[in-house]
Amino acid sequence: MQVRAVLFSAVAAAGLWQAVDRWQLRAVHPPDGPIAPAEPLQTDLEAPAVTTLARWRLTPRARYDITARILSREDYHFDPLSDLIPEDLALGWGPMSDNRVLRALEITQGGRFYFWRPKQRQLPIPRQDVIEHSANTHVIPADAATRRELQRLRVGQVVHLTGFLIDGVRDDGAYIHTSLTRKDTGPSSCEVMLVEQAQVEQADDG
């Protein structure tokens, strides 16, 4: 009887996990138009205070405040950074939060990168506008409550994140560095953000 009860509990837990995963992957469908028009706000720090999170020493480089549409999200459980960064968010603002632009792009994530390409030969907006109005953001939850909020985010939502752009070094020598500009692309262009608060601004399923 005990073995049967344990097996039942395991199956029930697996079913709940799959249901949560399906809910997270279910995109919302906002209306046309730039639904996150504002540029991210970044303020350099004169005397950053180093903090410790588990095995990592984190050095804040700038305070960061961003309201953006979630273009894609990717969870990581087993890669070398997953102990600190459990998920990446591909974020878009300005023209990259507009359905009329996004419908013309194919957006994917993988291997800690965010990828985009036009579905047709011509881009809907200039290439530099795509680069400067979207970013792959490695999000680090500052605490358990913030982690729960980040886990609930879905593609299509507009989310307001506040916290810090950080560099980090783990006790075994592994390290990460954040980008401090929205104008770069390719390796080392990702923002590494210690998120103190995550709040959904818009979640229209219409």
Image (spheres, rainbow, N blue to C red):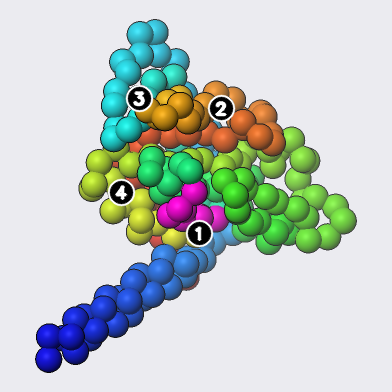
Are dots 3 and 2 in contact, CB under 8 Å? no
Q: Which residue is mark 2?
A: 179
Q: Residues within 10 Å of mark 3 (few under 14, many from 20)?
A: some
> In the picture, residue 20 is in which quadrant?
bottom left
Q: Is residue 29 visible?
A: yes
Q: Which residue is mark 4?
A: 147
Q: CA distance from mark 1 to mark 4?
A: 19 Å
Where in the figure is residue 128, as x and y percent of width and height? 74, 35
Relative height, residue 14 to residue 126 (above, below) = below
Relative height, residue 125 to residue 205 (above, below) = above
Q: Residues within 10 Å of mark 1 (few under 14, many from 20)?
A: many
Q: CA distance from mark 4 to mark 3?
A: 19 Å
* N-term mark: 1 or 3: 3
Q: Is residue 36 visible?
A: no
Q: Which residue is mark 1?
A: 156
Are dots 4 and 3 in contact, CB under 8 Å? no
**Nearer mark to the viewer, of 2 and 1:** 2
Where in the figure is residue 95, as x and y percent of width and height? 64, 45
Residue 148 shown left or right of residue 139 in the figure: left
